[in-house]
Image (tube, helix red, strand yellow):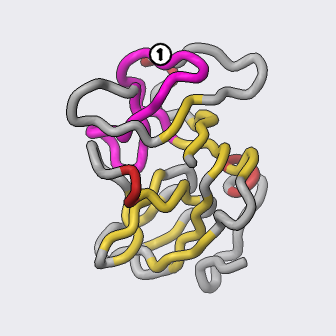
Amino acid sequence: MSYNTGQPPTPYSESTAIEVRRAEGTVKTFVTGAGVGTVSAGSIMKLTNSGALQTVGTEDPSAIVGVALYQAVSGARVTVAKGQLRAYWDGVGTVTPGVEIGLSTTYSGWFTAFLSGPAYSVGRYEPLPGGGTLTASNSGTLQVVSIP
C-alpha cells in the first residue's frame, strides 16, 4: 500500500475510521493536485488534469475516484477507495437511511442531502445498525455512505 513518504498511516485515526466495506479492486492511489494543501481522510475525491482533488459542488459523478483513506498533502499520493466508507457530512438538509447523497457546495470533499436540479447523486447514505437520520447537529462528522 502506498502512503506519503515519511508519514505512515495511523490506523486508529485514519484508515479504520474511514473504511467500512469496500468492493474488490477499488483501492487506488493518485498524486494529489498541486496547491490543494492538506486533504483529510474521509474527503470525497475527484480526478482532474492536475491530479486528485477534493470535490466541490455539482460535479459529474463519473469524475469521483473515491474517498480518501489517509491524510495527504499537495503533490503527495492519496489512497482512495470506493464502496461503503465514511465521508464528511456537511449538515445541509435531512438525510434518512438509504437516501441518495450529493456533493457539498459548502465544503470541499464533503457530502450533502441530494437535491433535485443541478445536483448529481454520488451514492447513498447507508448507516451502520443503530444509525439514523442526519440533521444539522451531525455536521462535520464522518458518516457511512456507499459510493459505487
Q: Name the residue beneath numbered marker 1.
A: 135
Circle 1: element type? loop
Q: Quadrant of residue 6?
A: bottom right
Query: Which residue type carries mark 1?
Result: Thr
Q: Quadrant of residue 145?
A: top right
Q: Is residue 16 above or below residue 140?
A: below
Q: Position of residue 137 (x, y in %)?
A: 48, 17
Q: Is residue 114 above or below residue 145?
A: above
Instruction: Please state which of residues 135 and 67 is positioned toward the viewer in this rendering.
Output: 67
Instruction: Please state which of residues 134 and 113 is positioned toward the viewer in this rendering.
Output: 113
Q: Is residue 117 magenta?
A: no
Q: Is residue 91 magenta?
A: yes
Q: Is residue 34 left or right of residue 144?
A: left
Q: Position of residue 39 (x, y in %)?
A: 46, 61
The residue sitting at 61% across, 63% down in the picture is 70
Q: Is residue 112 left or right of residue 30?
A: left
**Secondary structure mostly taken by the magenta-highlighted segment of the chain:** loop
Q: Is residue 49 above or below residue 17?
A: below
The residue sitting at 53% across, 57% down in the picture is 66
Residue furthest left in the image: 118
Which residues are the magenta region? Answer: 88-113
The mark tally for this picture is 1
Local crowd size for mark 1, using a 10 Å CA cut-off: few (<14), some (14–19), many (≥20)? some
Q: Position of residue 139 (x, y in %)?
A: 46, 27
The residue sitting at 57% across, 75% down in the picture is 29
Q: Position of residue 25 (x, y in %)?
A: 70, 67
Q: Quadrant of the N terminus?
A: bottom right
